Image (tube, helix red, strand yellow):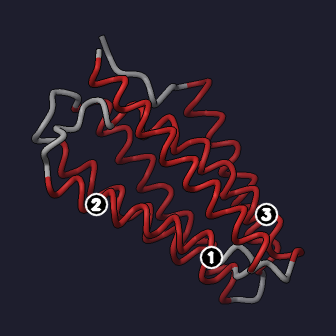
Amino acid sequence: MSYYLNAAKKAWAVIIFMGFCGVASLWFNVQDWKNATPLIIFYAVITINTFFSVRCFSSIIPPDNKLQWTMDICLLLSYILMALNLDNPLKFTVWAAVLFSIAVLKYAALLSLTNYFGLLKYKIIIDSMGTLSCVLVLSGIIFGYTLLAIWIWTIAFILANGFIFFIKPLYKLPK
């Protein structure tokens, strides 16, 4: 039980920090609100999602695993860089792609360390789809459809989160 409580504390710490980064970026960096608005919404949704992800998966990750800690630091850096680019769709999307790609590697490396194969496989599929969505959005940005691409991405991300929270829950440890 204390392992789960530590995971919950870690989850709160992570999202408070992410929230701080997002608000600080809004205050100091954001100039282009037209492009920033969908990215701010995306960042808010991924922050909420991250709380449940950290709370769930931190409870099954061996606490002394250096590779997992290293990947967590890389993920946190990706979140910071996303926050710093809330009004730059290209850079924000690149850092989101990095984040989802690192997450795929993180959970793939965890497969051999726990007995939660089904849950980890589902998480890897979801994060792989996140990476793919970033590549599609980058294509839209490169071809000049920036605002359309980031709004479609944000709406799709909200719908995907609805799916993983309400239809086929992701952040629930099997019994």
Residue drawn at (84%, 83%), measured in percent from left and top? 31
**Relative to residue 96, is residue 152 drawn left or right?**
right
Quadrant of the snapshot with the C terminus: top left
Residue 60 image point, x, y percent? 25, 31
Residue drawn at (61%, 42%), measured in percent from left and top? 48
Marks 1 and 3, the one that precedes in the sequence: 3
Judged from the image, the secondary structure of the residue bearing numbered disc 3 is: helix
Residue drawn at (75%, 62%), measured in percent from left and top? 40
Judged from the image, the secondary structure of the residue bearing numbered disc 1 is: helix
> What's under tag 3, amino acid-wise?
Pro
Quadrant of the snapshot with the N terminus: top left
Question: What residue does disc 2 label?
Answer: 71
Kindly identify which numbered label has been placed on residue 38. 3
Residues under labels 2 and 1: Cα distance? 20 Å
User: Quadrant of the rendered structure where residue 147 is?
Assistant: bottom right
Q: Are marks 1 and 3 in contact (CB under 8 Å)?
A: no
> What's under tag 2, amino acid-wise?
Met
Relative to 88, does residue 125 appear above or below in the rendering? above
Of badges 2 and 3, nearer the viewer stands 2
Residue 62 image point, x, y percent? 16, 38
Residues under labels 2 and 3: Cα distance? 27 Å
Residue drawn at (13%, 48%), measured in percent from left and top? 65
Kindly identify which numbered label has been placed on residue 84. 1
Residues under labels 1 and 3: Cα distance? 15 Å
Marks 2 and 1, the one that precedes in the sequence: 2
Q: Are marks 2 and 1 in contact (CB under 8 Å)?
A: no
